[in-house]
Amino acid sequence: AKAEPKLKAEFERRIAGKLPSNFDAVIADYKKKLSADKPKVATRKSSEMALEVINGAVPETIGGSADLTGSNNTKTSQTKNITPDDYGQRYVHYGIREHGMAAAINGLTLHGGLIAYGGTFMCFSDYARPSMRLASLMGIRSIFVMTHDSIGLGEDGPTHQPVEHLAALRAIPNHNVFRPADAVETAECWQIALESEKTPSTLALTRQNLPTVRTEHSAKNLSSQGAYELAAANGEAVVTIFATGSEVEIALGARDLLEKHGHPTRVVSVPCFELFDQQSDDYRKEIIGNAKVKVAIEAGIRQGWDHLIGTDGVFIGMHGFGASGSIEQLYPHFGITAEAAAKAVETRLHG
């Protein structure tokens, strides 16, 4: 220890579970770049981009995937494969064993000095849930990357399209479920996941490309509030639209239509229910607001949304299983479009 004081300090930092002192600055610089570049990419790609930055700044991360590395985008330039001949690397190919992967992530996390994450398809969280639940019960920093998070994954059809999975994971106590809307929110959600020493995280990420909706840089991590106003109404809001992930883009489109028809409409992005529920009563009341019509848009089931929109709120989402088809076919087929949302609001306002 005396001969290598820097090595000693680094070892003690990792064992204590603390992040490098420059971590927040690294993320802040990266967010500035994203707001300027405005990438249009799937949030699974946004996650890979964030991990490229994170894995370079946080050397104790160990990634992996349950036989879906190319689809989950969990591997970066820093994470070489762990093999029988080389245990000194930072990436595990777990094979098709989601439960085992999640258990191994927990084990690596409990060991200390390491931050472990692993990926699979969102629908296959069913296989991993017992270990995900135990991570929550133990209060540890395990991170689960769940891509292909909705009917937006397309032609694989309803066997692979998550419908009830967001609600099921949100039901687990002490578990942050993030569904970011763009590359900026994805970076923020990763930052929170890494900083949450006593709470595991799930990141629900898209297959389809999404535009950058956070085009103005904010030094504050807005996702840490769980929900925040993304677009204000032109005047006193008559309509508030809440949305997550890929449906935030749809919410903004519906807002434009409603504003053109003279209905002042605000949009609230809700990247994390659990963090929003932890905010002050005053903040929650401010964000929920008192608009005449409250709408939620999410390509999943309604369960969990009533605490934001009320039992009389308008829900645009899934009411059953998905179907095999392209995203261009499926979203209109299930009525998850800006036009359908605006029409439902008009009906409520004039009904």
Image (spheres, rainbow, N blue to C red):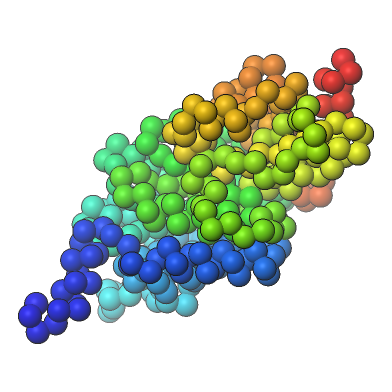
Query: Is residue 49 visible to us here?
Result: yes
Q: Residue furthest right?
A: 261
Q: Residue at x 51, y 64 (%)?
A: 28
For the N terminus, the quadrant is bottom left
| Position in image of residue 189 (x %, y %) | 50, 52
Q: As rendered, which of 121 and 76 lies closer to the eye?
A: 76
Q: Is residue 174 left or right of residue 303?
A: left
Q: Residue at x 47, y 56 (%)?
A: 190
Q: Residue at x 91, y 39 (%)?
A: 260
Q: Residue furthest left?
A: 2
Q: Is residue 155 above or below residue 166?
A: below
Q: Is residue 232 left or right of residue 133?
A: right
Q: As rendered, which of 317 and 286 lies closer to the eye?
A: 286
Q: Is residue 90 left or right of residue 318?
A: left
Asked where in the image residue 307 lies, by quadrant, the reply is: top right
Q: Is residue 134 above or below residue 43?
A: above
| Position in image of residue 23 (x %, y %) | 40, 66
For the C terminus, the quadrant is top right
Asked where in the image residue 241 lies, by quadrant, the reply is: top right
Q: Is residue 28 above or below residue 254?
A: below
Query: Is residue 169 visible to us here?
Result: no
| Position in image of residue 173 (x %, y %) | 38, 32
